[in-house]
Image (cartoon, rainbow, N blue to C red):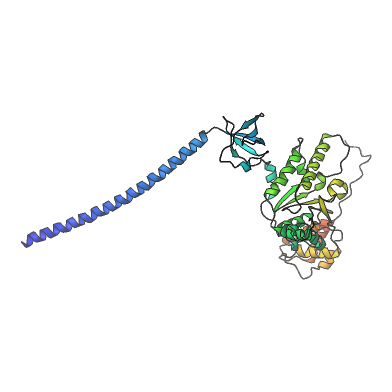
Amino acid sequence: MSEDLSYLMDKLKKLEEEYYKLREVCRRLEDEKRFIESERLRYEREVRRLRSELERLRSPPLLVGVISDVLEDGRVVVRSSTGPKFVVYASQYISPDELKPGTRVALNQQTLAVVNILPSSKDPMVYGFEIEERPDVTYSDIGGLNQQIEEIKEAVELPMLKPELFKEVGIEPPKGVLLYGPPGTGKTLLAKAVANQTKATFIRVVGSEFVQKFIGEGARLVREVFQLAREKAPSIIFIDELDAIAAKRTSSDTSGDREVQRTMMQLLAELDGFDSRGDVKVIGATNRIDILDPAILRPGRFDRIIEVPMPNYEARIQIFKIHSKKMKLDDDVDFNELSRITEGASGADIKAICTEAGMFAIREERLKVTMSDFTRAIEKVLRKASPIPDLKGVMFV
């Protein structure tokens, strides 16, 4: 009897072990089933996505057109890219307020119905003018131009940050500011500092970039730059070397001069067209104010004209301190003496002098810049160019 009981106990134990094994297998199979189900759902979603992508790629292309007129019954007159005009219906998903003359639209290829509103086209070159990152130049980085900084603050920064003051007083703020002076005196730095202070989009254009090969291209670029500035407002348009497109008009008959004059006409129209209290300000810079056309200097365009002169004695001391504040200087460096012996140097010259002085120290593997390094740098940067020899009467073989 005891043997039978022992046998039954062993059998029960084996059955129990088999049961746990089977339960473990069942649990594992259930996990695999859940995983396979999730994979099946994922693959089904991927198949649906690929099918929709395939359908999208198989859909016929849309035509690009421009709305010429909007009729009272809701239909619109569009001019397709092929040339002729058509009277068509617009999709019910497009708001009637968006259907305006001049708007670019997408047209169905068969019915030419308006199915979508397209953004206005811009030359890729225009987007290249925008400075993506805010300039890191501040007013403290500009030496000797305290009066000019105050004037540009009043003309550009104050209308953008506190327009209600001008409204309360009842005056219109200046539309544009023209900076003029010799090269290297800080005109571009002033514009960048204002853009930094106002947290505005900075759009920098060189005047010569508006001069294009084909007729009307320069005027179109001017128009699109101002349109980009309105879209990115608050923004500052900085036109460097303004004399490249705004020189005095002459009676020249060459097609190149006439095209530059057309570009200037468009610039004048844009300066007249935008609101002075708006969030778009224009800053121009030139080295040759004497050759600018009087039309661009009249009040209502560049209302405030600011001279940026060569730095005087005190200004040169400030500029030396600004450009050498991160340098390790020896105790014998005397900024007063450096300012005295750099009479006639611009801010850009002083920056180059500080850089060259640092290079002299690096060449000699020194960690500090001495006064002699500065004097050698001044001699190198400010030395007069050697005169061109007189070649008259020289026979070349």
Determine which quarter of the picture holds residue 199.
bottom right
Name the spot of residue 314 as percent of width and height, x first.
84, 65
Name the spot of residue 251 as percent of width and height, x first.
89, 37
Number of on-image labels = 0
> As displayed, is residue 162 above or below residue 74?
below
Determine which quarter of the picture holds residue 312.
bottom right
Q: Residue furthest left?
A: 1
Which quadrant of the rendered structure holds the C terminus?
top right
Q: Is residue 140 visible?
A: yes
Name the spot of residue 184 as percent of width and height, x first.
80, 55
> As displayed, is residue 308 above or below residue 263?
below
Q: Residue at x 86, y 58 (%)?
A: 344
Which quadrant of the rendered structure holds the N terminus?
bottom left
Left or right of residue 239, residue 107 in this image: left
Determine which quarter of the picture holds residue 350.
bottom right
Q: Residue at x 64, y 36 (%)?
A: 72
As rendered, which of 57 and 332 lies closer to the eye?
Answer: 57
